[in-house]
Amino acid sequence: MGAFAVVTLYRHGYIRPNNPSLQDYPVRGVDVSSFQGAIDWPQLVSAGTLGFAFIKATEGAHTHDARFLQNWTATSGLIARAPYHFFSFCSGGDEQAQNFLRFLPDTGELPAGVDIEFAGNCKHRPSYAVIRQQLRIFLNDVESVTRRKPIIYVNGASYARIVQRYFSGYPLWVREVITGPPVGSFPALTFWQYAGNGRVAGVGKLIDLDAFIGTTKDFERLLRLGHP
């Protein structure tokens, strides 16, 4: 099979480098936004392997995800949920936290997530020191309301340049869709986004697939305490 064919199959969700076993990672989840369009959540959950969902709520200081409230309501009582916020490098942490917290009907069953990545972010960003300062404000504001430490979503670049060594104690949700679980590289690894091209019943578009790092009992403890 040629390289072009492999890339095409990957982009359409027919090839996934990572295929973790349920025995090793029994608690699975998805993360969604308005990109996925309408989701048939009962059909998606009916397979029996889905335990949680990260659902995009807001972005930056003013943007709301168009399908958040619909997804949030539809998943109530079906699976454990966490709202997440896409953090803008060019807005203040306090106003971003206000945008996020004011839009939530409730805080869900899992700690809130904050997405830290360069893709799709503002181009004329301030220094990393300023970004860290504003991120810390956001995290503190969210924790003060939800009473749980937020989960920080990173990829290799955003972790190395922004988060590493500066935000110890926060659980991490790490994207690694090629090489397998990056357990040794991220001491606080709690969730692993192992695929960005999932094809699942109930969703017409590709979807991100995630796994909890730990046992079912560990996950139940996270639900009770808000931290692994």
Image (cartoon, helix red, strand yellow):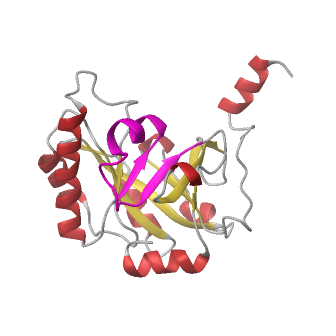
Residue 23: x percent and y percent? 74, 68
User: Going 51% across and 73% down the picture, which residue do you hit?
Assistant: 78
103 left or right, relative to 47: left
Quarter of the image where the N terminus is located:
top right
Query: How many circles with numbers are drawn on the protein?
Result: 0
When asked about the image quadrant of residue 128, the answer is: top left
Q: Is residue 103 above or below residue 177?
A: below
122 left or right, relative to 171: left
- Residue 125 painted magenta: no
Q: Is residue 150 above or below residue 161?
A: below
95 left or right, relative to 173: left
User: Going 23% across and 21% down the picture, which residue do you hit?
Assistant: 124
The front one of 38 and 23 is: 23
Residue 10: x percent and y percent? 70, 32
In the rendered structure, which segment of residues is drawn in magenta?
151-176
User: Going 57% across and 45% down the picture, which residue do you hit?
Assistant: 207
- Residue 162 painted magenta: yes
Asked if residue 152 can be seen in this view, the reply is yes
Residue 91: x percent and y percent? 17, 37
When asked about the image quadrant of residue 192, the answer is: bottom right
The front one of 2 and 102 is: 2
Residue 41: x percent and y percent? 54, 61
Asked if residue 209 can be seen in this view, the reply is no
Q: Is residue 212 above or below residue 61?
A: below
The front one of 16 and 48 is: 16
